[in-house]
Amino acid sequence: MEKTKSIHVWIYTALSVGIIAALVWGFAASKNARALEISNENQYNRAFSELAGYVNNIDTLLSKTQLTKSPAQLAKLSSDIFRQSAEAKSCLGQLPTNEVQLDNTSKFLSQVGDYTYVLSQLMINGEEISQEAYDNLASLNEYASTLSDTLSEIESRIYSGEVRISDTNGRSRGTVADAADGGILKDLENVEKSFEGYPSLIYDGPFSEHIENRQPVMLENEKEISQDEAKEKAEDFLTGEELTLEGMSENTAIPTYTFTRGGDGEISVNVTKKGGYILSYLNSRMAGEEKLTVDEATDKAAEFLQEKGFYSMQSSYYEKSGGIATINFAYVQDNVTCYSDLVKVRVALDNGEIIGLEANGYIMNHCERELSAPALTVDEAKERISTELEVSATKLALVPKDSMREVLCYEFKGAFAGKNFLVYVNAENGREEEIFILLESEEGILTV
């Protein structure tokens, strides 16, 4: 009897201790969760407040750009707008806005800094700003003002305690969905809708409208082929390999059919739906011991490109990793290197097998260009570069800008301070367009 009673006491004691421990743990977990909730809320509030401040600054700066006629002043203002817009995008990305798409708002913040920067560079280079450009600045200013006013109103409601941006414990007040009902995300959604009439900005910058809507030049007049026709082209490319349709891509700049084959190394081939060109090829087999030099691999890659219909291609830079050399080739027309028409070839250094091809740049850009003779001679262009550069080679090249506009340049390769450089001088006006450092090592030759 005493023994049974002792067991009961022990069980009750253990249960009591367990319950107390669970309560303590639950209290601590709840306390930690609440602390995390408060911390997250504070971070969201800080990000929102900073977003509102940056957009207000952009509004103010855009007002000033419409009055300046000074290249130096516009350069200063554009630099400030560029920095403020970058910070605003960062703050926007920190907010829990999964309930609403803010693509147009984000696009506005990207373009506003980029556009003003491009205008400032035009003025610095002695070009006049057109009335259309000033009209665009006025339009951007209006959108910035609307966005700034709305963000300020939302910020006031947050700090008055009327609404929260989010609440992680799921209480009815403050969840993301309820915040939308309360006006925060709903107001942002309305701001997003207000950008629906946002003007299409076509300019010489990376966020220009024409880049987003760009179509492959090489496929412009091509007809769409069937799945069977694409399969035949893929198997011909691999000299008779039996392939299976893996899938189709539609929502890309270059829609394709994808074919695969299993085995020792998985093989995949992407064929463009229009025209039936090979966009890419990959054999993922591992390479064995290196037996070929990069020069020998380059010769094999050049021969392969010739066989597959890529004519007049010139090798430039390469990268070596895991017994595989990836070699870049660019199209050459009338002794002008067209760097936009880029093809990459992967060569296994154990036996020289071609195990990869990437022709996206070539298909997006390749065409026969109307090349005009350079306005400057090579000696006149050389006078525009630093005398500190010891020039070892010179050639003409079409260099793509951020806007994808191509500029005819003289390419000067030379050495300075123990490093190799490439300096590009505009062959029409002598403007220095680009400077790259050549990084040369046993693993490859790349540019930065």
Image: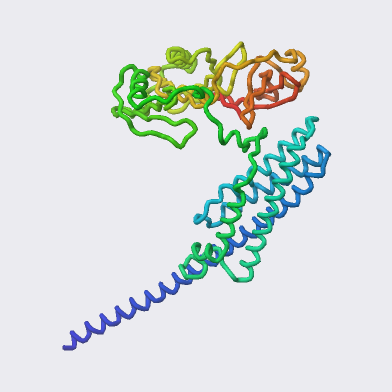
Q: Is residue 104 above or below residue 181?
A: above
Q: Nearer the viewer, residue 359 or 351?
A: 359
x, y percent for residue 373: 69, 13
Camera-side residue: 85 or 322? 85
Left or right: 433 in relation to 358: right
**Residue at 37% across, 30% down:** 258
Q: Where residue 236 sits: x, y (%)? A: 35, 18
Of all residues, the one furthest to the top in this rendering is 334
Q: Is residue 405 visible?
A: yes
Residue at 65% across, 38% down: 201
Colouring chosen for the image of the structure: rainbow
Q: Quadrant of the N terminus?
A: bottom left
* Residue closest to the far bottom: 1
- Horizontally, is 126 left or right of 170 in the view? right
Residue 151 quadrant = bottom right
Tell me, yes or no, if residue 442 can be seen here: no
Residue 69 in percent (x, y) is at: 83, 39
Is 183 placed above or below 82 here?
below
Q: Position of residue 407 (x, y in %)?
A: 67, 23
- Give the vertical position of 303 relative to 209 (above or below): above
Left or right for 322, reference 73 = left
Q: Quadrant of residue 406?
A: top right
Identify the image quadrant of the C terminus. Answer: top right
For the image, the number of numbered tags is: 0
Residue at the left extreme, as displayed:
1
Q: Residue at x 70, y 46 (%)?
A: 139
Residue situated in front as seen by the camera: 264 or 238 = 238
Query: Which residue is drawn at the image coordinates 74% and 45% (left, top)?
Result: 138
